[in-house]
Amino acid sequence: MANKIRLLARLDVKGESLVKGIQLEGLRKLGKPGDFAREYYAAGIDELLYIDIVASLYGRSNLSGILRQASEEVFIPVTAGGGLRSVEDVRTVLSAGADKAAINTAALHRPALIGEVAEAFGSQCMVLSIQAKRSRTDPARWEAYGENGREHSGREVVEWARQGEALGAGEILLTSVDCEGLQRGMDLALLRAVRAAVRIPVILGGGAGSAQDLIGAARAGADAVAAASMLHYKKAAVPQLKAQLRAAGVEVRA
Amino acid sequence: MTVTVIDYGLSNLLSVQRALEHVGASVQIADTPEALAGAGALVLPGVGAFGDGMAALAARGLAGPLRDAAADGVPLLGICLGMQMLFEESDEFGRHPGLALLPGRVEKLPDTAADGQPLRVPHVGWGPLLPPAGGGGVGGAAEAAGAAEFAGLAGAAGPAEAAGGAGAAGFGAATEAAGTLAGVLPGQECYFVHSYEAKPALDATRLADTLYGGRRVAAAVGRGRILGCQFHPEKSGPVGLAILAGFLRMAGG
């Protein structure tokens, strides 16, 4: 039987706007993040994931205001990421209402940050965000990218995930850059490879376009799935997705 | 209804405050014994380690006043670490005494499931609230009354108040605290994040269990007007908000 999965809505934020790109490029403004968050909360989403998509480039996170607003009307777990470089940055988003911090680029540059955040706030707060691009030469190999898919790290994803867990990450947000924004299915080979390497929960993101994709991810061992385009563009609604998951034998929160 | 939320440096204060406000409370934050004095209802949130939490309470001079207030019958809600600190002691990173408002200890979650498979710790995620297996129910009332002497709480869980819990849908013992779960249906889920679990010494103080790794884990505990939630009601959607509303109701607001 498939795992029970959590369904996350991923909200990419640029400035004051909710944006969405394809393969992390070509961002389109879709509206106010608060409006989407409120709707998904009311519809029964299990968690929200806010990523300040340009913060890392500019070296600062802009999320606090958006998180504070969300804390007034959204009463489910919230993960915040994008541009978090230090324990103090994490403290800032946690005090603005986030429950967990997702860190990618800064951890690639300085892996010790993972342990520092886990020690300061508990491993459950430390979500290691990995943006994975499949190798052109070896389809069973992925490289972790920083700066929203723009910066090579030279790190192999499975090994990086294993190292992240050892350093204290409590969860892995695994995003396939190749599949991201296309809504044509998720990289289940990537998920299986990472799933086999770590014990901590893995959230799979990138490419979800239908209930079938979510069911596939659950069967391949995802603990959670992050969806963005399919929700933002109203291709699917949370209650129907959950009903379809349930009908396929995948447990979800009622 | 004004609720005083204790700020001792280890919690998601803003989320707790917003959720309480959402269900109609006006929230006052207290980080000194003076600010805590005269509170009509108290909330002790918490994210972090047990020893750090108790040390932070002690450093601010809050542990004694908190115990005294609860002993005087001021409604008290402990959340996550705040719930665990209601008990007598914990094993987390060495042995640490708690507030001892409820009898029992706090122990590490086992890292194997009931079927012997490896189990992830911390337990992070949504888990169902279930009526407790042992004790609880009708038979628990006498035991709860007997425990009222514990930690100087005589009178806090008297039989008259105990009747107030009758509304709960199969949840827990007949204490006033159990009434806070009145809006919850068995099986509805709440959000948990924890590596340690409370082991209440009295079944009657066990108001709801959850399941993790095929084992029952104390999810809500209480006695008299003291309620503890291992889960985060402020992060548990409408179910959690209903429990916070129940707490306000118990507190008279």
Image (cartoon, rainbow, N blue to C red):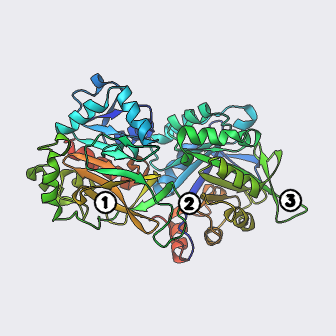
Q: CA distance from mark 3 to mark 1?
A: 50 Å
Image quadrant in which you'd find residue B42: top left
Circle 2 Cα neighbour tier, 10 Å, few/some/many (<14 / 14–19 / ≥20):
many
Q: Residue at x 25, y 51 (%)?
A: B222
Image side of residue B72 versus residue B36, left or right:
left
Image quadrant in which you'd find residue A192: bottom right
B162, above or below A238, in the image: above
Is residue A176 or residue B90 the one in the foreground? B90
Residue B176 pos. (x, y %): 18, 51
- The disc placed on residue A12 is none
B19, above or below B197, in the image: above
Task: Say what amino acid the circle numbered 3 marks.
Answer: Ser
Q: Chain of mark 3?
A: A
Q: CA distance from mark 2 to mark 3?
A: 28 Å
Task: Say what amino acid the circle numbered 2 marks.
Answer: Leu
Image quadrant in which you'd find residue A141: bottom right
Q: Which residue is mark 3?
A: A135
